[in-house]
Every structure is written in structure tokens, then in C-alpha cells.
Amino acid sequence: MAIKPHVPKPPACTPYGTTAYYEWPYLPSLGPGIAFTVIFGLVMLTQAFYTFRYRAWWMVFFVIGALLEVLGWIGRLYSHFCSYNDTMNTMQISTLIMGPAWTQAGVYCAMWVLVQILGSWVTPVPPVVYLWVCVIFDTVCLVLQAIGGGLAGDAATHFKDPQTGTTIMVVG
């Protein structure tokens, strides 16, 4: 992988394409950013409403997942206007990676609740076993992604090949 030559970092709110520095290979689109921010915001509010209305506290995983998606899309929207802001870039990348893991944890909890309602005869594995196995595997995957992302980011910052970190992140 070719390493980019050192180009001075522009101010954080420099419009895209006005410098030789390209953090993003493209300008984040405004329309999808607004649409997904609104959609995930509505989903989050609906899930929060049902969580409290039915006291289904396991649904808080869905609320957190949707909140992380909203934050990620807000960061992406901001990046449309200020393309070189590292804080917003990091925010959108990290939250859009973590959000689906929380949503998946909600799915595991929903399966656990469903099996308890239908009866244990619907699955050969006790519900608490697959719940914890899935949560542990998701946690390990997120940790690997974080380690790989950190290694790749550090390598890129020091103008070294980020392939090792990228590989670890993809494995996660």
C-alpha cells in the first residue's frame, strides 16, 4: 500500500477539495446524511417510548444502538461542511461501527425473551447460553476492531503501512 507524502493538515473547517490534503476520498453526501439522521432519530424515539411504556428494559440495547447511529450520522453531516475535522471523522467512524453491535445485542435479548415466551422446547440450546455466547463474541469482535483501528490510525499518523491494523480490524 502506498503511503501518502506528508501534506500539512488544513484547518478543521476547510471546505472539501480546496487543499491538497484528502482525509476523505470523497465528499460525504448531504441528502443521505439528513435522511439517515432523521430515520434513526425517529427509530430511537419510538424504541425509547416502547421501552418505558412496556417496561421492557432489554430494549435499551436498541435505543443505545439507534442513538449511536444518530451520533454517527450527525458527525457525517458535519463532515459534509467541515471535511477535515478529525473529531467529527473519528466520531462518525466509531459510532457507526459500535451502533450495530448494540442493536445486535438487542436482537439476542429479543430472541431470549421470545424463547421464554414460547417455551424452551423451541430450541435445543438454553436461551441464557446463546445469549451470553453471542454477547461475548460481539464483545471480542468490537475489541478486535478497536485494536485494529487504533493500530491502523497510529501507523497512518506516523506515515507507516497500516495494513496490520487494517487486517486486525477486518478480522474483528
Image (tube, rainbow, N blue to C red):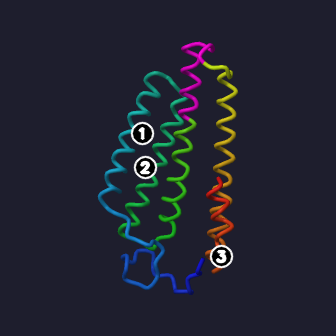
Residue displayed at 29% across by 58% down: 31
Considering only order in the chain, which callout, 3 or 2, is on the residue closer to the N terminus?
2
Q: Amino acid at mark 1?
A: Met
Chain part drawn in magenta: 106-122
Look at the numbered disc 3 and give the secondary structure of its residue: loop
Question: What kind of element bears circle 1?
Answer: helix
Q: Which residue is mark 1?
A: 44
User: Do callouts 2 and 1 mark residues in contact (Cβ within 8 Å)?
Assistant: yes
Which residue sits at x=67%, y=25%? Answer: 128
Q: Residue at x 51, y 59 (%)?
A: 93
Circle 2: residue type: Val
Residue denoted by label 2? 70
Q: Tag 1 or tag 2, which sits nearer the N-term? A: 1
**Residue type for callout 3:** Asp
Q: Secondary structure at mark 2?
A: helix
Q: Position of residue 109 (x, y in %)?
A: 57, 29
Would you call the spot at circle 1 few (<14 residues within 10 Å), some (14-19), or many (20 or more)? Answer: many
Instruction: Count neighbours of disc 3 (C-alpha within 10 A) and say few if under 14, some if 14 to 19, many if 20 or more.
Output: some
